[in-house]
Image (spheres, rainbow, N blue to C red):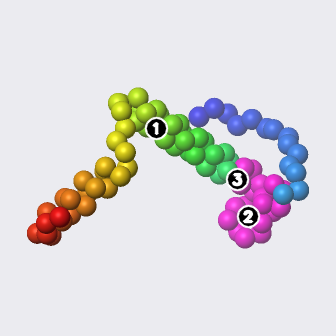
Amino acid sequence: MAAPKKLDMTLDEESAAIVADALHAGSFERPEQVVRAALRTWKAAERRLGELRAAIEEGATSGPGIPAEDVFDELEDRYRRMMGKTA
C-alpha cells in the first residue's frame, strides 16, 4: 500500500454533518476514517455498477428478445404440467 497522503478539504454543511454524526454515534474515531469508509463504499458501488452495465450489454447483444407474455405463458404451462393440471 502506498504511503498515506495528507489532503486538506472543505466539506459542505450536509457532508460535515454526516461525518459529525458518524463520530458522535461512535462508529468512527476520526473524520478521516469516515471518509475512507465512504470512499471504499463508493468504489465498491462503482465496480458493481460496471458489472451490471456489462451484464446488461451482454444481454442486449445476445440475440433477439422474447416477449414477456410468451415467457409467462410458458411458465404457466410448465406449472400446470408440474401440478398435473391441463390447460
Q: Nearer the viewer, residue 30 or 76?
A: 76
Residue position for label 3: 33
Viewed as shown, does residue 62 lie left or right of 87?
A: right
Query: Nearer the viewer's eye, disc 3 or disc 2?
Result: 2
Q: Earlier in the sequence, mark 3 or mark 2?
A: 2
Q: Nearer the viewer, residue 65 or 23?
A: 65
Looking at numbered disc 2 in the image, what kind of residue is underneath it?
Ala
The residue shown at (49%, 41%) is: 52
Q: Is residue 19 magenta?
A: yes
Residue position for label 2: 22
Where disc 3 sits, the SS reads: helix
Q: Earlier in the sequence, mark 2 or mark 1?
A: 2
Assign the magenta stretch its main secondary structure.
helix
Q: Residues within 10 Å of mark 1 (few under 14, many from 20)?
A: few
- The answer to whether 26 is drawn above or below residue 10 in the figure is below
Mark 3–mark 1 Cα distance, whole angstroms, equals: 35 Å
User: Horizontal and vertical percent for residue 71?
Assistant: 31, 50
Q: Earlier in the sequence, mark 3 or mark 1?
A: 3
Residue at the extreme left:
84
Looking at numbered disc 3 in the image, what kind of residue is underneath it?
Gln
User: Horizontal and vertical percent for residue 70?
Assistant: 31, 49
